[in-house]
């Protein structure tokens, strides 16, 4: 069975500066957008450990660190780098066209 996906226009690139994070919802998805050193990443926003909102966490060179129990998730792979989280975050494809950021969602 194929899954239909679509590209959602989230914001202008100027709204997400280096070191910034931005949250948005699309249907039932809660998504985190992050600008880590000029590269844009999109992942699920809710921590896989105990459902903290990662948009209130800390962005650093390792990824995003959960504000509740401090697991850090790699933004490229979604994989937690330390306990207590063990389950990866879902990651989304990102593209930039004409200075607009798009995220691919199903
Ligand atoms: S809720 Fe994120 S590490 Fe526990």
Image (cartoon, helix red, strand yellow):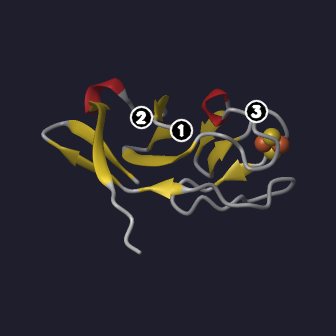
Q: Is residue 11 above or below residue 91?
A: above
Q: Which of the 4 image quadrants contains residue 10?
A: top left
Label of residue 28 in the image = 1
Mark 2–mark 1 distance (CA, rounded to whole Å) = 27 Å
Between disc 2 and disc 3, the foreground one is: 3
Mark 3–mark 1 distance (CA, rounded to whole Å) = 22 Å
Counting residues from the start of the chain, the first of labels 2 and 1 encountered is: 2
Q: Under tag 3, what secondary structure? A: loop
Q: Quadrant of the C terminus?
A: bottom left
- Residue 72 in sight from this viewpoint: yes
98 vs 41, left or right, is: left
Q: Quadrant of the N terminus?
A: bottom left
What residue does disc 3 label? Answer: 67
The 10 Å Cα crowd at callout 2, few under 14, some 14 to 19, many 20 or more, is some
Q: Is mark 3 within 8 Å of ligand 1?
A: yes
**Contact flag, marks 2 and 1 (Cβ < 8 Å):** no
The 10 Å Cα crowd at callout 1, few under 14, some 14 to 19, many 20 or more, is few
Counting residues from the start of the chain, the first of labels 3 and 1 encountered is: 1
90 vs 82, left or right, is: left
Query: Whole-percent x and y of residue 11?
Result: 30, 29
Q: Under tag 1, what secondary structure? A: loop
Label of residue 18 in the image = 2
Residue ID at (80%, 48%): 49
Q: Ligand 1: give its quadrant.
A: top right
């Amino acid at each position: 069975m194929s899954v239909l996906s679509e590209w959602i226009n989230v914001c202008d690139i100027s709204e997400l500066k280096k070191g910034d994070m931005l949250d948005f919802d699309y249907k039932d998805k809660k998504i985190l957008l992050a600008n880590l050193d000029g590269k844009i990443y999109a992942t699920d926003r809710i921590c896989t450990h105990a459902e903290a909102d990662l948009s209130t966490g800390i962005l650093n060179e390792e990824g995003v660190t959960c504000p509740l129990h401090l697991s850090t998730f790699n933004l490229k792979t979604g994989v937690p780098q330390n306990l207590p989280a063990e389950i990866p975050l879902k990651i989304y494809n990102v593209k930039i066209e004409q200075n607009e950021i798009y995220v691919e969602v199903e």
